[in-house]
Image: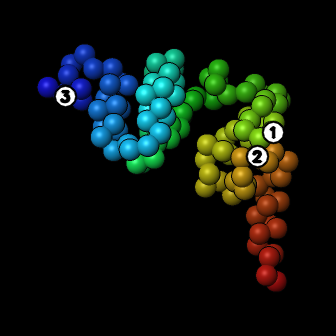
Amino acid sequence: MTAITAPNATVYDQVYACSSPLIYHYRQDLETHDKDWIESNPGVPFIHMTRSTGTQLIPLYPHDHKGWPKAGENVSWLFGHTDRFGVLVCVLPRHPTATGCYRKAAATSCDHRRRRQSTKGR
């Protein structure tokens, strides 16, 4: 019986069973970082992606979860500081304002950026 079909398998056991055979480098992504996050955030849904060089885990926190910065609060984030909107932009890279997580995304509104992009090349 595999971890996926075992009746008492944890969420991490299931993720590990699916991901482990595919990872050749940076196994600590799965075995340390992902395990710690999954075990410390029970019940929080997430997207888990696996590649040969590690994993990526994207938490899908509810709007009032402790994982989000409080409204109006700036927090350390990668190469600088940002607010909860900046964190969201990094989690959702297809958002129109996503130009890089190291920038304070909240400094430019979505409408302003769309107007600026639509006038390029004119």
Instruction: Tell me how far mark 2 sits from mark 3, CA to CA.
Output: 41 Å
Q: Earlier in the sequence, mark 2 or mark 3?
A: 3
Q: Is residue 34 visible?
A: no
Q: Position of residue 70 (x, y in %)?
A: 75, 25
Q: Is residue 10 visible?
A: yes
Q: Earlier in the sequence, mark 1 or mark 3?
A: 3
Q: Quadrant of residue 94?
A: bottom right
Q: Quick check: 43 above or below 106?
A: above
Label 1: state its secondary structure.
strand
Q: Residue furthest bottom?
A: 122
Q: Are marks 1 and 2 in contact (CB under 8 Å)?
A: yes
Q: Quick check: 37 above or below 120?
A: above
> Residue at image x 19%, y 28%?
2
Q: Amino acid at mark 2?
A: Tyr
Q: Which mark is residue 80?
A: 1
Q: Position of residue 44 (x, y in %)?
A: 49, 25
> Residue at image x 45%, y 47%?
53
Q: Which residue is mark 2?
A: 102
Query: Is disc 2 surrounded by few (<14), some (14 to 19) or many (20+) residues within 10 Å?
Result: some
- Residue 48 lies left or right of residue 122; in this view the side is left
Q: Which residue is mark 3?
A: 2
Q: Position of residue 13 (x, y in %)?
A: 32, 25
- Residue 84 lies left or right of residue 9; in this view the side is right
Q: Amino acid at mark 1?
A: Gly
Q: Earlier in the sequence, mark 1 or mark 2?
A: 1
Label 3: state its secondary structure.
loop
Q: Quick check: 91 above or below 70?
A: below
Query: Is disc 3 surrounded by few (<14), some (14 to 19) or many (20+) residues within 10 Å?
Result: few
In what quadrant of the picture does the N terminus appear?
top left
